[in-house]
Image (cartoon, rainbow, N blue to C red):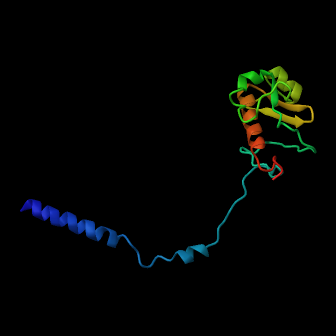
Amino acid sequence: MTRTRFALLAAGLFLCGPLSGQETDFDLAAQRSESQDVRPVPGHAVDHGGLPLNPVPHSLVRGEGRLDVSGGVRLRGEGARFAADLGFLPLARKGAALSVEFGAKAAARRGVKPLSGAYALRIDGSGIALTGYDERGAFYAVQTLRQIAESPAAAGG
């Protein structure tokens, strides 16, 4: 007898549960007309020229011209340390130069802030130069280069 009552109670809760959970007065259209208050994010805007970079760099200067890396890149400096992370660019003996350096002295030469993770990335006719304040900064520079290389904006699209 107890099992039968329990089974009937369970069946009743199962059948009535979904019915009681649905509201008939809910109007989604009324929510669409509510005003949305969006506050500005602190900081400053950086014109990244259509390049989807995340996180947004503190500063970005875009020059004219292009660097052709279709023939590959040749690693210089500490580049071999990051070879596995640079798999998005083909390696070649006679390709465009790609130098990677990090450390306080290298960072000071390139004007990189003395802050862990800080870096500078330069792409010009002579090649690509990545300079990190520390190894973390050099890694972040490689990741930014990846975003640039894989961007439709970089491909002319």
The image position of residue 87, as x and y in percent, is 71, 32
Q: Position of residue 48 (x, y in %)?
A: 82, 49
- In the rendering, at what x and y percent does residue 101 appear? 80, 24
Q: Quadrant of the N terminus?
A: bottom left
Q: Using the image, determine if residue 37 lies above or below residue 33.
A: above
Would residue 96 be found to the left or right of residue 54 on screen? right
Residue ranking furthest to the bottom: 25
Q: Splitting the image into 4 quarters, where does residue 136 fall?
A: top right
Does residue 91 appear in this view? yes
The structure residue drawn at horizontal position 21% and vertical position 66%, both measured from the top left corner, is: 11
Q: Is residue 60 above or below residue 73?
A: below
Of residue 34 and residue 52, the one placed in the foreground of this image is: 52
From the viewer's perspective, is 28 left or right of 16? right
Residue shown at 66%/65% (left/top)? Answer: 37
Residue 74's place in the image compared with 38, above or below, is above
Front in this rendered view, residue 64 or 133? 64
- Residue 75 image offset from top left, x and y in percent: 80, 25
Please give left or right for residue 6 compared with residue 18 in the image: left
Residue 7: image quadrant is: bottom left
Quarter occupied by residue 83: top right
Q: Can the viewer see residue 116 in this picture?
A: no
Q: Residue at x 80, y 27 (%)?
A: 92
Disc tally is 0
